[in-house]
Image (cartoon, rainbow, N blue to C red):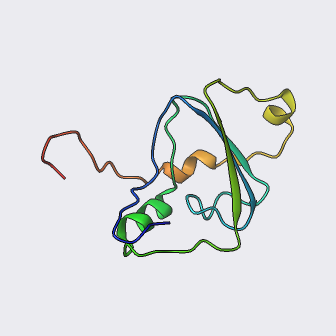
Amino acid sequence: MVAEHSFRPPWYHKNIMSELMGNIYGQYDAKPEGFIPGGVSLHNCMLPHGPDEAAFEGASNEALAPVKLDNTMSFMFETRFPQQLTAFAATEAPLQDDYIDCWAGLEKKFDGTPGVK
């Protein structure tokens, strides 16, 4: 996940792309506890998103050394066009009702003040 002598910052972002993310098998590194195989998430354009609190803290505090992800496969489709759920996906398909809770414990770490860490 990180090349030697480099840094991979946590993955929070908000952009103009709509992202459909899926986990085929194994564990997804940004949400190890909440993104099971067969799971799919949709983040439409300009919707902020990123890893859960545990993944953020782990990535922020672990030694920056090469790490090989093994026995996992995920995919992402991106488009500049907003996506819509089908009626089935919105009402009948199994949903992870606590999906948003993975960000509940995140602390604000940046206030925009120049020179303040």
Q: Where in the figure is residue 73, as x and y percent of width and height? A: 71, 62
Residue that extends furthest to the top in the rendered view of this protein: 81
Would you identify the image quadrant in which residue 28 lies? bottom right
Q: Residue at x 43, y 65 (%)?
A: 59
* Most distant residue in the left direction: 115
Residue drawn at x 76%, y 45% is 95
- Could you tell me which residue is drawn at 41 percent across and 59 percent down? 8
Asked which quadrant contains residue 113, the reply is top left
Task: Tell how many labels.
Answer: 0
Give the left or right position of residue 55, taking residue 115 as reference: right
Residue 69 sits in quarter = bottom right
| In the image: residue 45, left or right of residue 38 | left
Eyeballing the image, is 3 above or below 94? Answer: below
* Looking at the image, residue 111 lies above or below residue 80: below
Position in image of residue 2 (x %, y %): 45, 66
* Rendered view: 76 above or below 90: below
Q: Nearer the viewer, residue 54 or 74?
A: 74
Instruction: Choose between 18 and 41: the one closer to the eye.
Output: 18
Residue 99 location, x and y as percent?
Answer: 63, 48
Q: Nearer the viewer, residue 80 or 52?
A: 80
Q: Nearer the viewer, residue 99 or 13?
A: 13
Which residue lies at the image location 71% right of the left edge and 68% below the top edge? Answer: 26
In the image, farthest residue toward the front: 4
